[in-house]
Image: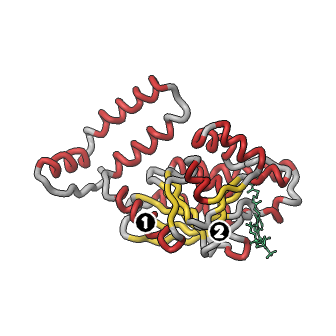
Amino acid sequence: MAVRIEQNESIAIVTMSRPEAFNAFNTEQLRSLRDAVAEVTADREVRAVVLTGEGRRAFASGADIKEMSTMRPSEGLVFGQLGQSVTAAIEASPQPWIAAINGYALGGGCEMALACDIRLASENAVIGQPEVTLGILPGWGATQRLPRLIGAGLASELILTGQRLNADEAQRVGLVNAVYPQDDLLPKAIEMAKAIAANAPLAISASKRAILLSRDVDLTTGLAYEAQTFGLLFDSDDQKAGMTAFLEKRTAEFQGK
Ligand code: CO8
């Protein structure tokens, strides 16, 4: 199976598995990831998702260079749109996604991580956008998401030089939040996912949406959206459950309603 989904309590772990090519995305692998994203997104039992790569060396080494090497413009467009539909689906998912970057995250691999809400890395991670060294540009969102994450100057340097960052450099520029030894990465990502999953699901997905919106709108519009959403959450059972539990000095059980 090219993309595996495992359930761990209310967490889904999605593993991109094409180890013979460092988990590179050919069309089949992209479709498998698209289907996996759709499956976990539709599963109301899943409250947070960890995305990682098979093995100890790669998260994903990017789009499949062999498959791309013979593409004509129309095929490149379709391939680009397919990859963009996956990154868009990760962002549109109500659950937060944590990328556990366990090795190479290059090109499209980095772009999948950029579509996630939070990025953690192993000490051996190598992250970059080497597309211009291949005569193309990042096609699954890095020209748009990377500048929004780390600023236009640093994003330009990474994309235009094709330079690869090690884990510490990636953390320094804010591309990843934390760096762990390889064996600790997945447990740490799962721990963070479970901490998120213990919170109110509607509040989590509303927060995710508002944070994503902050990239695209001015402050006044964003604050108006925040206030509207804040008000709407008072119509949820979870708001009553959370505040009642606080007042009764116990832990809340959230139903996502
Ligand atoms: N595509 C296809 N095969 C790959 C890829 C890849 N991206 N990466 C690795 N492989 C394969 C190798 O060809 C090799 O296969 P084989 O054993 O059959 O020769 C196998 O994986 C192992 O690779 P290496 O022998 O090269 O292993 P190393 O440890 O020496 O190096 C690296 C590992 C550093 C990951 C190296 O393989 C590498 O640099 N790979 C390419 C990384 C890259 O440039 N990625 C960006 C690709 S472009 C992209 O992602 C664009 C996204 C947007 C597309 C939009 C389309 C319109």
Kindly state the secondary structure of the residue where label 2 is placed.
strand
Q: Is mark 2 within 8 Å of ligand 1?
A: yes
Q: Is mark 1 within 8 Å of ligand 1?
A: no
Number of marks in the image? 2
Kindly state the secondary structure of the residue where label 1 is placed.
helix
Query: Against 219, is 123 above or below?
Result: below
- First in sequence: mark 1 vs mark 2: 2
- Please tell me which residue is depicted at 66% across the width and 61% down the height of the picture: 126
Give the residue number, with chain letter if any, for mark 1.
Answer: 190
On the image, the x and y values in percent for residue 30 come to 67, 61
Q: Quadrant of the N terminus?
A: bottom right
- Please tell me which residue is depicted at 67% across the width and 46% down the height of the picture: 142
The amino acid type, in three-letter code, at marker 1 is Ile
On the image, the x and y values in percent for residue 58 come to 65, 68
On the image, the x and y values in percent for residue 223 come to 41, 28
Compute the Cα span from label 1 to label 2: 18 Å
Give the residue number, with chain letter if any, for mark 2.
Answer: 58
Question: Viewed as shown, does residue 4 lie left or right of 81?
Answer: left
- Observer able to see residue 89: no
The amino acid type, in three-letter code, at marker 2 is Ala
- Mark 1: few/some/many CA within 10 Å (<14, 14-19, 20+): many
Location of ligand 1 given as a quarter of the image: bottom right
